[in-house]
Image: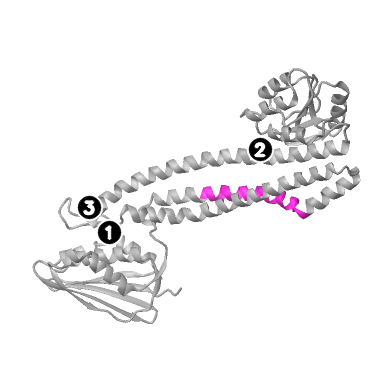
Amino acid sequence: MTEHGTSRTTTPTIFIVDDDHSSQQLLDDTLTNKGYSTRLFSNGIQALQEALEDPPDLVLLDVMMPGMDGFEVCRLLKENETTGHIPVVLVTCLNEKAMRLKGISVGADDFISKPFDVAEILLRTRNLLRVKEFGDFLKNHNVRLEQQVRERTNELETAYNLLKSTQGQLLQQEKMATIGLLMAGIAHEINNPVGFISSNLGTLKKYSERLAEFISGQDEAIKTGVIAQQLLEHVSALRDNLKINRILHDFPQLLEESAEGTDRIKKIVQDLKCFSRTDNAGQTLADINQCLESAMGIANNELKYKATVRREFGELSPTLCYPQQLGQVFINLLVNAAHAIDERGEITVSTRQENKWIFVAISDTGCGIPEDIRQHIFEPFFTTKEIGKGTGLGLSICQDLIRKHGGEIDVVSEIGKGTTFTVSIPVVEQ
């Protein structure tokens, strides 16, 4: 057994397994003259053992050998996880259909017939090594991608558990930002990168089918027995027709885009760590009056025992917004208005549009807010309620959500007469 060529880190290694010395030497000379590294074996058992210890990049395997024939060696190579991805070319002087079908059944990737055609040997070797190279690249990239996904998933689970704990406290006091809405936001943000990763994998699948068709076309051309020059011309035309060059050019870009998609998922996880960046459902064209109706329906039990609710709705243009976020704001303001009324009072909900701005005013006839308190009501964690009765995040969250819509929230209050919160947001057309 001899070895030729440079280190396997730069040169593909090819196993030549043949008990006929002259055939073995011809294959060896042909391949080493083209710069390939070869290892020669006279029996299949020895080649199989060496392949398991130090896998080659390609195996040229004679069918008729003593002890263990090429079919059995091929089957064992393909069934083993270590060697199953290595291309195997069966070398035989038997061209019967039954023998080729048997070779395919045990996993052979290609065939070379004796007596040898040098152009055929080099062409099949080059193409199979190229397919293996891209297969190895894709396999290694997938391993890294899976590791990144596992890491991102762990980060996502950590962030999710942290958010779930935080929401539990907010739900108890503010009845806002339920975990369902948060998870809907997460799904919305992750959907885009997952979408184009899935698309890229679909493209890679089509490309692999074209490469398989390219190899099959070569095989068919060789079977016809055309001369080398005609064979090369046919293969060149087939290569152009199937756009093999484009496939080879696109492979790295598709994989790189998929890696970028995983980075985007990582950014989403980082964003989720900050509550103010959590998104709910996507934007949609909505009627603000209808959003208010829904909010009042949800808050009805808080309102009906404390106040008579008056509606003074103006005609509003539909606006592109996050309806669920606005609903959270309106519910919070309505509940606060009810809490400001000691006995029985009145809550007025009015809307109007001026030019390209929508104004929503929620007024109550409650106790009013002193000036020294009014200066702090939008600060996070500021609350005048008893310990355990409020988190102090309600109005802070409201202000943040309105500002995300490009609007503002203002308050006017008079002790003993009541308070009016006014939300203003721009009209955004579809």
Are the residues flagged by discs 1 and 3 in contact, CB closer than 8 Å?
Answer: no
SS for dot 1: loop
Q: Position of residue 40 (x, y in %)?
A: 79, 23
Q: Is residue 254 magenta?
A: yes
Q: Residues within 10 Å of mark 3 (few under 14, many from 20)?
A: few
- Which badge, 1 or 2, is on the more N-terminal residue? 2
Q: Position of residue 355 (x, y in %)?
A: 38, 82
Residue 296 shows in this picture: yes
Q: Quadrant of residue 301?
A: bottom left
SS for dot 3: helix
Q: Residues within 10 Å of mark 2 (few under 14, many from 20)?
A: some
Q: Quadrant of residue 135?
A: top right
Q: Which mark is residue 172?
A: 3
218, 382: nearer the viewer: 218
348, 137: nearer the viewer: 137
Q: CA distance from mark 1 to mark 2?
A: 56 Å
Residue 58 lies, with reference to residue 42, above or below; the image says below
Residue at (15%, 66%) from the top-left corner? 340
235, 157: nearer the viewer: 235
Q: Which residues are magenta?
A: 241-263
Q: Judge depth for marks 2 and 3 and give the one in front.
A: 2
SS for dot 2: helix
Q: Is residue 404 magenta?
A: no
Q: Which mark is residue 159?
A: none
Q: CA distance from mark 2 to mark 3?
A: 53 Å
